[in-house]
Image (spheres, helix red, strand yellow):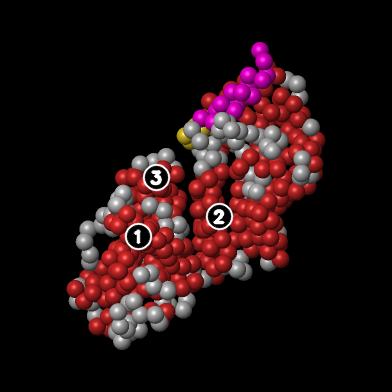
Amino acid sequence: MSASAKKRPAEVPPDAAAARLAPSPSPEVGHLAAAETHIAIETVFRIEQARLIAGLVRLVRDVGLAEELAQDAAVTALSEWPKSGIPKNPGAWLMAVAKRRAIDGFRRNTILARKHAEIGRDLDDSPDPGFEDVEAAMDDDVGDELLSLIFTACHPVLSTEARVALTLRLIGGLTTDEIARAFLSNEATIAQRIVRAKRTLGNAGLTFEMPRGEERAKRLSSVLEVIYLIFNEGYAATAGEDLIRPVLCAEAQRLGRILSGLAPAEPEVFGLLALMEIQASRLPARTAPDGSSLSLTEQNRARWDQLLIRRGFAALERAETLGGANGPYALQAALAACHARARKAEDTDWKRIAALYDTLSNVMPSPVVDLNRTVAHSMVFGPEAGLKLIDEIAPAAALRSYAPLPAAKGDFLFRAGRLAEARVQFERAAGLTRNEREKAFLLGRAAACGG
């Protein structure tokens, strides 16, 4: 596509057009139906947005332009649907309108007639987009297009922060305000991050095609990393006053479920999904009524979500069936499953957990895995064994300012009866964490050591 084909007004924060979707609340009864219709349209758009953008990216080869076209279609729906009603296939209706907008844009920018015909072929003979048989306006390979969009949003050319923000925006359908609140940032920062990410993708000369072979495996790893980063920030917030942010966990789980439907032969996709489902099952029990942290042994396991546990077990079984039992995410899911199967903390199969960590440390060597391995070994062989192992890994640069390291060492010392030393470690851990709830929990453990 020529540069002239992509000309459009200067980029604006990605929610500028979407902001027009918000209904104006009114106490008047006569406006109630319209407000309800607007809410329904917003809901439909959030559901269809990712698929809509995915199909449009393939046509216009520009993520930013595709998002603008999708938002313009939603604004058109706000005008038309309150009068005509929501169509049977709202996604196809939106796609038809967006494609027509694309054609108009190409005309204004004098694009080649060949490209005009390519995009408009299946629409030129169509009546108003309210027609019932509008399914023809949708591409049959929408699944491949959506998967391609996920790969694009997580492209290695982008920074990790940009990949996370763009994925939540394009695939998750979150507004910049929602993303900013989830990550304790401000809307302007997130908006500019997304704008820069889209500009970077546009300047990178990407084909927006599905990666193949070794490139696909490498890019899939980036996609899984982004989804798990989103989940982890929800499961154990790195900063702020809240220990958990369930909305991020739920969004990561939803992305994982979408990905499992689009890539049903990838074992690590199911390994990650299993890990998230099982870990998310504990969210209702992870905090006390006052919001303070509860350790795994303190949690009321009756509050664990059994539906999520069953979903996690099913996803783990699928990963293993596909030959991925020793994949990094599948191994972590198997570890989570050991806890989920134990009705009481004392029933936990720590020997199996230690063995799984031994395998994981070989498959995915990392200081954090090594630290978790020391915890498992301390539960099997005693706190002194844990102390020996933790002293061996402590010099690792990645662990020097990592609060869980002194927290784990403090626990080993506490269990060994070395309370004064334990107190020092808990206080050190409290000084390293940026999460207020976690800090309070660690200071509480320090106080329990006396002295």
Quarter of the N terminus within the rendering: bottom left
Residue under pointer 2: 253
Q: Are marks 2 and 3 in contact (CB under 8 Å)?
A: no
Circle 3 residue: 180
The residue shown at (35%, 53%) is 194
> Going 24% across and 80% down the picture, which residue do you hit?
112
What is the span of residues highlighted in magenta in the rendered image?
A: 436-451
Measure how far apart labels 2 and 1 are at the Cα level: 33 Å
Residue 53 in percent (x, y) is at 38, 66
- Residues marked 2 and 1 touching at CB (< 8 Å): no
Q: Which residue is mark 1?
A: 33
For numbered disc 1, what is the local secondary structure? helix
* Residue 60 appears anywhere in the view: no
Q: Position of residue 59 (x, y in %)?
A: 35, 74
State left or right for residue 327 relative to residue 55. Answer: right
Q: Amino acid at mark 2?
A: Gln
